[in-house]
Amino acid sequence: MSSPTARTTEAPAGGATGSGTRPAPARRRRGVRSLVGLVVLLALLLVALAFPLYFGEFWLRTGFAVFGAIVGAIGLNLLVGNAGQLSLAHAFFLAVGATSYVYVSGEPGGLGVAELDGLGLPPLVGMVVGVLLAGLAGLIFSPIAARLRGIYLGVASLALVFIGIHLLNTWTPVTGGFNGRAAPDFSLFGFTFGNTDPQLWVLGVPYREAERLWYLGLVLAIGAYVFARNLLRSRPGRAMQTARDSEVAAAVMGVNVQGYKARIFMISSMYAGLSGVMLALSIGSIAPESFGLELSILYLAMIVLGGLGSVGGAALGAAFVVALPLVFQRYADVVPFVGGPGEAGLAPGEAARFLFGVAIILVILFEPAGLAGFAHRFRRRLTRPGGGTTTPPPPDSPEGSTRPDPSDRPAQGSTTT
Amino acid sequence: MNQFLSLLLNGVSLGALYALIALGFVIIFKSSEVVSFTHGSLLLLGAYSIARLSGPLGFWLAVLAGLLITAVAAFLVERLIINRLRGAAVISLAIVTIGVDIILLTELVRRIGSDILNVPHPWGGQSVRIGPVGLSQNRLIAILVAGALIAAFFAAFKYSSWGVAMRASAEDGETAALMGIRQGRVSAVSWVVAGVLAGVAALFLVGSPTPGVTPANYAVALRAFPAAILGGLDSTGGALVGGLLIGIAEALAAGYQDQLLFLGRGFSAIVPFIVMIAVLLVRPSGLFGTKELTRV
């Protein structure tokens, strides 16, 4: 999270050509800022590494759920925020990932009345297959995705969620049907991410399932984050964002708009697939009801609250959306208006949903750049003492998709000339 | 053959209701460029209000009150939120309606809980026979009312000053505004009309053969989405055709589910979505939607 400042709109200024023309203090300030960023990053990493030593199972499990959601949210944000394609199908791709993992790594056997199949391969294979199959599902859907624009895609993708739920409910040998099935523990080359085998103690703290999963989640989330950041700064990333702002302009400059749209849909689905595997690990089982439209909407809430188009924002949003209901549940007696099961007041999940709904509306109305926008403003005020309020307003929102559709502009231009 | 005819008739009745909801989507989209994800909970709100108020007020007053509540809710959404976002990207607008939807739906589901609220339709649950085929009385009335409403809507759309204003704003908002058409008012009226249409659809959707008001009614509005999309989001006629198509397809799939068992139980609920995807593959802007042209 060191420098989400270097967004596409200002990135050229930080390049070699831009900094040469800048006055010296500005350059020094940039240097200081990146140094501060580095220190903050290292500190965050240290905190994350030491976290399991000090916090109990509840927080570690919440943390793993958050990491899983971060992966998924980053993937969705690439699609919605950076490529400008609204998708409500994220839950479906999560389901593909989770189901593939459970099927590939699960053991065949009977569960109650249902006869389950399973390949019993190592969990790592299951995870990889889950990601690949989710990507494949995205690729299969992408001919539709690439042809449809904006809102049509949003509604068409709705279809996938319902088809997915139907499959989960009826394809019992693979999915476990209505009741779902258990997800096998993850393991890596003989090291199990379970409670035992091998027993592990670090600095006197027993490292059981929750602690081990925390590190797994941390690594995957950081990997997802870095990949997305690099993707956005690469040629395909730039091309994609140009296509979002104006398909015609992008096509004129030689960007294969359809091709990029299809590919980003696939990448986003792969992110969702990994997130789905992590969700299965986090819950310990899969069930159709976990992958409903509500999940898609929650993911949308994450990226909107975090800030469309910002990778760091997606991570922040994911943490907020996933952790809030869990924290409400845990501290139901402290939080106002929230009651535990059987008590007066709102159920924790309901309270969280009300909050998300209000937050989405407020963010779109007043701060379209979301949490990332807040962080951005805060950081600028921090690094430019006294300058934060007097400097001319920055490009109002770095996230193009929250501005009025820029593709209107050329049409207006043609009428005035 | 008789079974087929009966299913067809049932499909038409279901389709008429879908068409009502889809018309709401279309006029909202035409007037304010918003794809309203709030519609599902508006529908549920209408159904819930009618069911709850028909105890103290009696059926007819409750229906009036329910429609009024739905209309006011739609009006408030437009005034308080959508109107402030004029000119925002279509995606942001859609997302903001999802935010409204989360709030409304959470509250309604909380209130309904696991109950099934009954709406005491005076026409009850009997079915009528038309020649060789049978249809529940509720659905028959639904066809008639929906048909009348849709006809009235198309007449208003064509001849009333609101209809003309709306078509003008949909054609070219800026020019329409320069001609003195108040965009805000056009949009607000459209939301109110859409709310009332959803309320009417709700009234019949919770009658026989469905058991009553449950949170599952919400999903019906989502199945009307394909209707609006496959007809073309900006085509009112398309909504009508789309609604009927979806309704008939769903009813047929439900009726022949024994033959379709290899696709799994409950397959009929996802038929609308499959039809939509099939149509979109061939025509990305729906059957009657205008193709988006980009001028440079």
Image: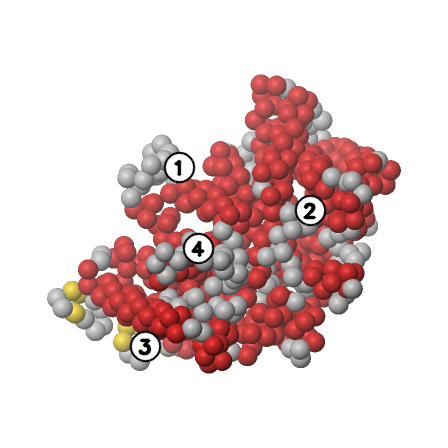
Find disc 1 in the rendering and name its residue: A346
Disc 2 marks which amino acid? Ser
Q: Is residue B236 left or right of residue B125?
A: right
Task: State the separation of the CA atoms marked 3 and 2.
Answer: 53 Å
**Which percent across, then down, holds residue A238?**
56, 74
**Looking at the image, which residue is at 59% across and 57% down?**
A403
Callout 1 crowding tier (Cα within 10 Å): few <14, some 14–19, many ≥20: some
**N-terminal-most mark, 3 or 1:** 3
Residue hosting label 2:
B32
Depth check: give the residue in front, A341 or B115.
Answer: A341
Give the quarter of the image for residue B215: top right
The residue at the point 51 percent across, 48 percent down is: A366
Checking the image for residue A390, the label placed there is: 4
Mark closer to the observer (3, 2): 2
Mark identifier at residue A188: 3
**Of labels 1 and 4, the one closer to you:** 4
Under mark 4, the amino acid is Thr
Q: Quadrant of the C terminus of chain A?
A: bottom right
Residue type at mark 3 is Leu
Q: Element at badge 2? A: helix
Q: Residue furthest left?
A: A204
Residue A337 in the image: above or below residue B167:
above
Residue A148 visible in this rendered orientation of the protein: yes
> Residue A13: x, y in percent?
49, 73
Of marks 1 and 2, the one in the foreground: 2
Chain of the residue that carries numbered disc 2 in the rendered image: B
Q: Secondary structure at mark 1?
A: loop
Marks 1 and 2, how far apart at CA: 34 Å
Q: Residues within 10 Å of mark 4 (few under 14, many from 20)?
A: few
**Mark 1 vs mark 4, CA separation in Å:** 44 Å
